[in-house]
Amino acid sequence: FLLNHISVSNLNNGPVCSCRFSFKIVMEIKELPNQIFEFYGEPRMRKKDAAEHAAQGALWYLKQEGYV
């Protein structure tokens, strides 16, 4: 599979202390041409936590489909 890109967005809806980060993983799998998969993590206070949550969703899918 090919990990196309990861993007982060700052969902700031108030003061700095209420800042939340969310990650989106966009993935293309060579065996499934013309299909793009997107995985979203829940908004989290720390960028690292948001990235890990999105990555867990992508990894779960890859395991379920037998790619990992």
Image: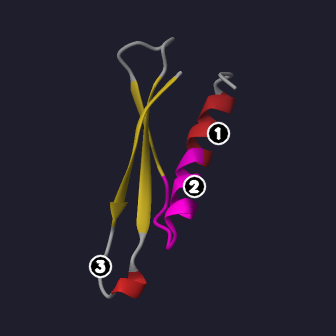
- Residue 4 on image: x %, y %: 41, 30
The 10 Å Cα crowd at callout 2, few under 14, some 14 to 19, many 20 or more, is many
For marks 2 and 1, the one nearer the N-term is: 2
Specify the label residue 13 is tagged with.
3
SS class, disc 1:
helix
Tell me: residue 54, above or below residue 20.
above
SS class, disc 2:
helix
Q: Mark 1 points at which residue?
A: 60
Which stretch appears magenta? Answer: 41-55
The 10 Å Cα crowd at callout 3, few under 14, some 14 to 19, many 20 or more, is few
For marks 1 and 3, the one nearer the N-term is: 3
Nearer to us of marks 1 and 3 is 3
Q: Separation of disc 2 and disc 1 at Cα?
A: 11 Å
Main SS, magenta residues: helix
Tell me: residue 22, above or below residue 66.
below
The image quarter containing residue 63 is: top right
* Colouring rule applied to residues: secondary structure
- Residue 53 on image: x %, y %: 57, 55
Residue toward you, 63 or 21: 21
Q: Is residue 45 magenta?
A: yes
Is the residue under label 3 in contact with that under label 2 (CB below 8 Å)?
A: no
Residue 67 lies left or right of residue 41; in this view the side is right
Is the residue under label 1 in contact with that under label 2 (CB below 8 Å)?
A: no
